[in-house]
Amino acid sequence: MSYSMGEHEIKPVSFSYEGRYIQLGELNDQTQELWIVCHGYGQLANYFANHFRVLESPTRCIIAPEGLNRFYLQGFSGRVGATWMTKEDRLVDIQNYLNYLEAIFHQVTKGMEVSRLKINVLGFSQGAATVSRWVTQSDIDFNRLILWAGIFPPDLNIPRSKKKLGSIRVDFVYGDEDPFLSKSDRVAEQRSIARMLGVEPTITQFHGEHVIDRDTLLGMV
């Protein structure tokens, strides 16, 4: 559906798009747990996945998707990062990454008896909003949602999200020196949104900043 922006008419176009993800471990008859971990703003899946190598085991597979929008972190060359969305045409970005995450899940679990898997989803920083939208809008039966250094987005559909999250364990993890959370009102905002969703998250605080803490992560398995 087209819409107007100033003097211009904005028209959508749909086309095939190829994304990528990182996989640690195998999905086979031995697999008991599937972890899907989404990075934060300005990160790439290849590097973010390294934090989760400590979780690798013959019974656990880790999938790290990557935001569909990549950019140079400084200037016009050098390090590259990715983002899940921006404020520009945000609803289209959201729908695109929801379709992308669904496609990854169905590709990696094709031919498997999904009901026997424990499916954990972790979102770090901006990735927390990303996975929150996915978990609450998808028909997949997730077991656990971990919001690490990030919070529920305030635009979730409350009735649908409340119903979906009622059967899922929710964890909220953050560092006591995280400048984006501990020194702001974001933690209070998280608690407020969680109450509206009827969720009582398990809260884990570690000594550190805006990072994936290795010991804390190991304590969650």
Image (cartoon, rainbow, N blue to C red):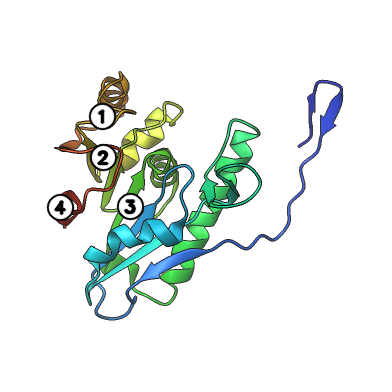
Count of numbered circles in the view: 4
Indicate whether 99 appears above or below 1: below
**Picture quarter containing residue 202?**
top left
> What distance separates the C-alpha of mark 2 from that of mark 4?
28 Å
Marks 2 and 1 in Cβ contact (< 8 Å)? yes
> Which quarter of the rendering shows the C terminus?
bottom left
What label does residue 121 carry, if any?
3
Q: Which amino acid does label 1 sit on?
A: Gly
Mark with earlier residue (4, 1): 1
What label does residue 198 carry, if any?
1
Taking the image as shown, residue 184 lies to the left or right of residue 14, namely left
What label does residue 166 carry, if any?
2
Marks 4 and 3 in Cβ contact (< 8 Å)? no
> What distance separates the C-alpha of mark 3 from that of mark 1?
19 Å
Q: What residue type is labelled 4?
A: Asp
**Crowd band around label 3 with a 10 angstrom C-alpha radius: few (<14), some (14–19), many (20+):** many
**Crowd band around label 4 with a 10 angstrom C-alpha radius: few (<14), some (14–19), many (20+):** few
Q: Name the secondary structure under disc 4.
A: helix
Farthest bottom residue in view = 29
**Crowd band around label 1 with a 10 angstrom C-alpha radius: few (<14), some (14–19), many (20+):** some
